[in-house]
């Protein structure tokens, strides 16, 4: 998502961060370790948000499956949407 559209309105003091690789920071909840979002210095205007953190419908539709090369063996994809074994580089999404 666009970084300019993201704001933490409550609980910012509970976030901790670590650099998972050069230029990539991952933010997580210090109380439980849940991943929240990541930033990448290569694409400073974007961030990767974990959709499992949302408590409302993000009002988006799925148009492809990515990272299927590492999906759990019991996950079955039954639609006809395009599949990518890996993912697009961070920052190449619409």
Image: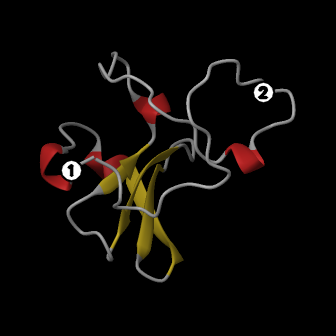
Task: Point out the frontmost of discs 1 and 2.
Answer: 2
The local secondary structure at tag 2 comes to: loop
- Where is residue 60 shown, x and y percent of the image? 33, 24
Location of residue 49 (image quadrant): top left
Query: Is 60 left or right of 36, judged from the image as shown?
Result: left
Query: Is 12 left or right of 5, judged from the image as shown?
Result: right
Is 4 located above or below residue 45 in the figure?
above
**Residue drawn at point x = 19 percent, y = 45 percent:** 6
* Residue for badge 1: 2
Q: Give me the C-alpha separation between circle 1 and circle 2.
A: 30 Å
Is 79 located above or below residue 88 in the figure?
above
Judge the density around disc 2: few (<14), some (14-19), many (≥20) Cα neighbours within 10 Å: few
- Where is residue 14 shown, x and y percent of the image? 37, 48
Q: Residue furthest bottom?
A: 22
Q: Nearer the viewer, residue 67 or 22?
A: 67
- Where is residue 34 shown, x and y percent of the image? 54, 43
First in sequence, mark 1 or 2: give its number: 1
**Residue drawn at point x = 34 percent, y = 51 percent:** 93
The local secondary structure at tag 1 comes to: loop
Is 79 located above or below residue 83 in the figure?
above
- Residue 75: mark: 2
Judge the density around disc 1: few (<14), some (14-19), many (≥20) Cα neighbours within 10 Å: some
Q: Residue furthest left?
A: 4
Is 43 located above or below residue 63 in the figure?
below
Query: Is 92 left or right of 36, judged from the image as shown?
Result: left
């Amino acid at each position: 998502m666009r970084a300019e559209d993201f704001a933490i309105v409550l609980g910012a003091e509970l976030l901790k961060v670590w650099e998972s690789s050069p230029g990539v920071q991952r933010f997580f909840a210090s109380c439980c370790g849940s991943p929240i979002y990541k930033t990448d210095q290569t694409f400073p205007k974007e961030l990767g948000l974990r959709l499992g953190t949302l408590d409302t419908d993000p009002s988006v539709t799925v148009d492809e499956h990515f990272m299927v090369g590492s999906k759990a063996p019991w996950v079955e994809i039954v639609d006809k949407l395009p599949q990518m074994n890996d993912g697009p580089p961070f920052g190449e999404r619409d």
